[in-house]
Image (tube, helix red, strand yellow):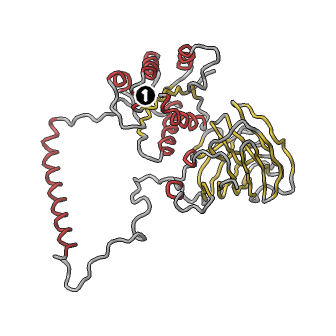
Amino acid sequence: MAHDVFISYSSKDKNIADAVCFTLEGRYIRCWIAPRDVMPGQAYAESLIDGLNQSRLMVLVFSANSNNSPQVIREVERAVNKGLPILPFRIENVTPSKSMEYFVSSSHWLDAMTPPLERHLQKLGDTVQMLLTGREQLPQAVLPAPLPTKKRGVLVPVLVTLGCIVLAAGILGALFFSGVFRRQGMPPKAPPTAQTLPTGPQTPETPPQASTATAVKILPSGILYMDNFSNVGSGWPRFSSDIQLSNYDNGEFSLQGKKPNVNAISANQSAGHFSDMVLETEARLAGGPDASMYGLVFRMKDINNFYCFMLSGDSAYFLEKRVDGVFSPLVKRTPSPAIKKAGVTNLLKVACKGPDITLYVNGTRVGGFSDPTFSEGWIGFAVRPYEAAATARFKSIKISSFQ
């Protein structure tokens, strides 16, 4: 089987490597990652070489662990010998060892050292997509080069002048606030209170932060996660491919499936992993054939392993699981009068307790199943078009503790 990306990482960074794999496969970029893709009965080294031979690009999860890993260095060395482009994804501020520097010093590095990780993962996905489609070439060494000698004579006086200006401005500011330049009788300006302190990005260059980073402190008791999609930086992927289109849109999250009978899936990694829970969303089929399906993905390990609870625009529901890319129905497509038709919002709810899964629509229990395959994972949305493209819109999502 051909792959697009070989993911090289230290086993100590497996969580990050899995997130990289999940992000790329969520964009239908085929990944080779150990130990998942090591063929049973095949020698590890032989399987690794096959993975490199079948791939077009290597993503290196670079950290102190991988920097000192002989296995990772061997993988990188093999990739270089095979002419495979290498894209280092740096999760720690570590100077490359001499061996690592020899192989990757001319590569373009993506830094992922500042939270939230999801923002860097999306940038990684964008970059990999552009590289694979030939719309971007890997630039050469990005380590800062020393300034040419002939420019230093001009730069130093400029820096000195700027330093003097900043110093003078600081002295004047200090005098002003100490009262020297304050007009007689004018009270000193009050310091900012907690209510007046800035709470959001102050410049366009500051990327939006995920809403979950601050929402944790104000969530009601028993609520593990919630989002009304008013913050476009809350972690839901926004991208377009030949299979799907996803984006925030006027306080809703929109997911379009472009290919009939092919699932469009969008999952939020920054929301976290969940096991026992009650998962709810308000959603509707906003466009496409009424037989198209839309709904929730939960306990998701990766793009090929998850549960899926979906409704159709013609008032039916089903529950299925996907294991290693193969779908199996747990509850077959079943009509229900509790489900409102296309264009009208439904409240979907999934209650998970151990292997037991119970399904609700608009407050009515419609079915359930017991299955131990997946015990925890990410949450997300799914759309499966029927005969033509279909779009679902999600107004909110909430996860509560199982009572």
Could you tell me residue 172's position as x and y percent? 17, 68
Could you tell me residue 10's position as x and y percent? 47, 28
Q: Which residue is at the front of the view, 105 or 360?
A: 360
213 sits to left or right of 27: left
Q: Residue furthest bottom?
A: 185
Q: Which residue is at the front of the view, 357 or 83?
A: 357
Label 1 neighbour load within 10 Å: few <14, some 14-19, many 20+: many
Q: Quadrant of the N terminus?
A: top right
Name which residue lies at 57% across and 44% down. 269
Could you tell me residue 146's position as x and y percent? 22, 35
Q: Quadrant of the C terminus?
A: bottom right
Quick one: SS at disc 1? helix
Q: Which residue is mark 1?
A: 66
Name which residue lies at 65% across and 58% down. 396
Residue 397 shows up from this direction? no
Q: Is residue 196 above or below residue 356?
A: below
